[in-house]
Amino acid sequence: VTIHQPSPVIFDLLDQLILLKAGKIIYLGPGGMEPCKHLAALGYPYRQGYNIAEFLLETVTDKAASCNFAQEYEDSEEFQKQKSQAAEIWEEFVHQTKPGDALERQDTRRLPPKRKASITLAAHAEQENLEYYANSPLREIFVLLRYRVAVKWRMGWFIASKLAIPILVGAVYSSFFNSLPKNFWGSFTTAGLLFVTVALAGFLSIAPLEDFKGEWPLVLRQRQDAYYRSGSYVMEKILQEIPYGLMGALGFGVITYFIIGLKMTPYAFFFYTLTSFTVNMVSTAIAFGVASNIHIDFLPQALCTVWNTLNILVSGFFLPKCQIPKWWGWLYWISYQQWTWSALMINQFGDQSGVENAIRDGECTASFDSGSKCSDGMGSLLNRLPMLFQSAGMNANGNQCTAMNNFTLAMFGLGKGSHSSQWLCLLYASLSLPIFIGLFWLGIRRSSSSRQ
């Protein structure tokens, strides 16, 4: 511990003391009055009743002092004794095969066996001649959460900063898209809003990326000193982001969902929030995975932006699957944004999340022509398209709103095949999470190991 100007009570607690001046040791030994005796022997007696710590600091920093304290310490018998002890300890360490045991070797040319890192507990590592960590993985995660995350949770401004962006963005969107009708334009706008909900998470993941980059030098030093395992740090970062992702999903969802007027069933709202949380966590894991493997200042942000843009292009909103070039077809199937947007679309326009009372009672049909925006001219014709297509096999039971929902899903190629279930789409999207967490772990382990 480094202590500047300790009080007398704290100074009395120091069993051993090191005094430095200009980066050189001028005293190393017991605490208490021993350093005063050392200085008294050099011609600087202690004044009774004076704060020992202040006396030591004033004496060694006195510009008028002509004594070379560092040289006097090196010429002392105590220094020679300590140097000899250090040499013996080092010699024992470099020739040991098991921690604490010195090996009497017949062949002095034989190098000590190389010890490898261990993922086991200390007792087993001691027996197997392995380097080991002081704590178990669960204990490491607990300590990291307690001393890194819990401290932040006691800062009101920090929690507010995590909620401010999704709430602000949700308020802006709600001011544009409030009370959308159920006609063609309203359904198409709703599809766009659901798409923005997914795409926004990818770009907002830059914030935790910057937080990770800021603490990266400290992580490297702590990993080199075997403070914790790579997996423990990765789990701490992911667990830290879970409440932030949930708060972001709730903050954005509560505002936008009810003001815009998405499907008013508890099932649909729960699934909407769960999907928003999933896409937040996957986006954060991607940012961590990229940043842990690439340490050029600007490159992780650039790569995350490019990756999000590519996911947007193959999401199915701008281009249907049949229009995506063959050389980008693979990305369509692994795109987490494509699967989460598909899940939200089926949740909103399908029947799996329940049927709104307004549709069941026929009340939503009034928004097609009465007071709805863009209902004149081309809008009126487009509003009738679902009923026209109903005769071609879209079963809507004569309900115009149901026909519009079926038409919207069919327009984007959803509701059938691999996109027939909203939960299946969400499952496919969530499969990206363990992949990028694994990439995150690999980057931490590779980067910290290469510097040891």
Image: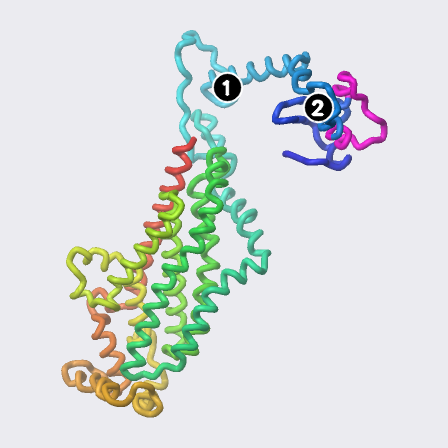
Q: Quadrant of residue 23?
A: top right
* Numbered tag placed on residue 30 in the rendering: 2
Q: CA distance from mark 1 to mark 2?
A: 24 Å
For residue 231, side relative to residue 422 (left or right): right
The residue at 21%/75% (across/down) is: 410
Tally of numbered tags? 2
- At 48% from the left edge and 39% from the top edge, which residue is drawn? 228
Question: Which label number is shown at residue 160?
Answer: none
In the image, is residue 88 part of the stretch drawn in magenta? no
x, y percentage for residue 109?
40, 10
Which element type, helix, strand or loop, lies under badge 2? strand
Look at discs 1 and 2 and give the one toward the viewer: 2
Specify which label sits upstream in the sequence, 1 or 2.
Answer: 2
Q: Is residue 209 visible?
A: yes
Q: Residue at x 44, y 10 (%)?
A: 105
Secondary structure type for disc 1? helix
Can you say which quadrant of the picture contains the N terminus? top right
State the extent of the magenta-drawn residues as a range. 37-57
